[in-house]
Amino acid sequence: MRKVIVSTYATLNGVIENPQDWSFDYFDEEAARFASDQLFAADALLLGRETYESFAEAWPARSDTFADRINSMEKYVVSTTLAEPLPWGPATLISQNVAEEVAKLKQQPGQDILIYGTGRLTHTLLQHGLLDEHHLWIIPVIWENGRRLFEGMDSYKLELVEAKILPSGTVILCHRPAKQA
């Protein structure tokens, strides 16, 4: 069975919005290696509309091994407002029955399914027991404004499975949902 993995950049004070404004100074060789390993362990992206639109604007103009992988991967876009996918690589729109559709994707053969960012989509997957891992990149910067990590979410217990400290001071915490007793 495929795993659904969420990867999120957050500041020390929990801001997750616009990581391009505050995270790049902390992206070192080890961060690049972890990000690349994570990406190449997946063969599909599962994206909410906002992330999908920002990625579709940013990634097609780039060309390197990482960008080529993102641009060519199958994308599953969760949105009730998009009428059709944008012209950015192969994409399938999921506009209803999100949990059911993601459960079907997990049953298909293939590699991991990767989500970037933590928002309503992550919340839905947690509610339905469909999230397998959360990779939280804590960037050592405090940012004054922006949407916060886990804003408006219910309570969930997670268990730490790995912690990695990078030379830049970034800490990557890998959690799984805790098993219910």
Image (cartoon, grey):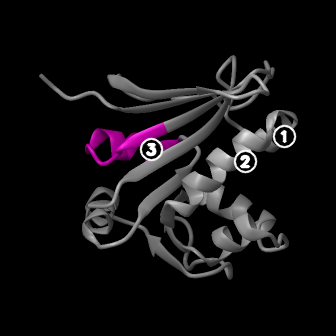
Residues marked 1 and 2 touching at CB (< 8 Å) = no
Under mark 3, the amino acid is Thr
Does the stretch in magenta take in 129?
A: yes
Identify residue for label 3. Answer: 122
Which amino acid does the dot numbered 2 rest on?
Ala
- Crowding at dot 3, Cα within 10 Å, few <14 / some 14-19 / many 20+, comes out as many
Closer to us: 40 or 16:
40
Disc 2 designates what residue? Answer: 32
Percent coordinates x, y for residue 19 in the rendering: 76, 40
Instruction: Tell me the magenta residue range.
Output: 119-134
- Answer with left or right where residue 20 lies relative to residue 114: right
Using the numbered discs, state the Cα–Cα distance from disc 1 to disc 2 in whole angstroms.
11 Å
Mark 2 neighbour class, 10 Å CA radius: few under 14, some 14 to 19, many 20 or more: few
- Residue with the mark numbered 1: 24
- Location of residue 55 in the rendering, given as x and y in whole percent from the top left corner: 71, 62
**Does the image show residue 65?**
yes
Q: Which is more N-terminal, label 3 or label 1?
A: 1
- The CA distance from mark 2 to mark 3 is 23 Å
Secondary element at tag 1: helix
Question: In x, y percent, where is residue 171?
Answer: 64, 25
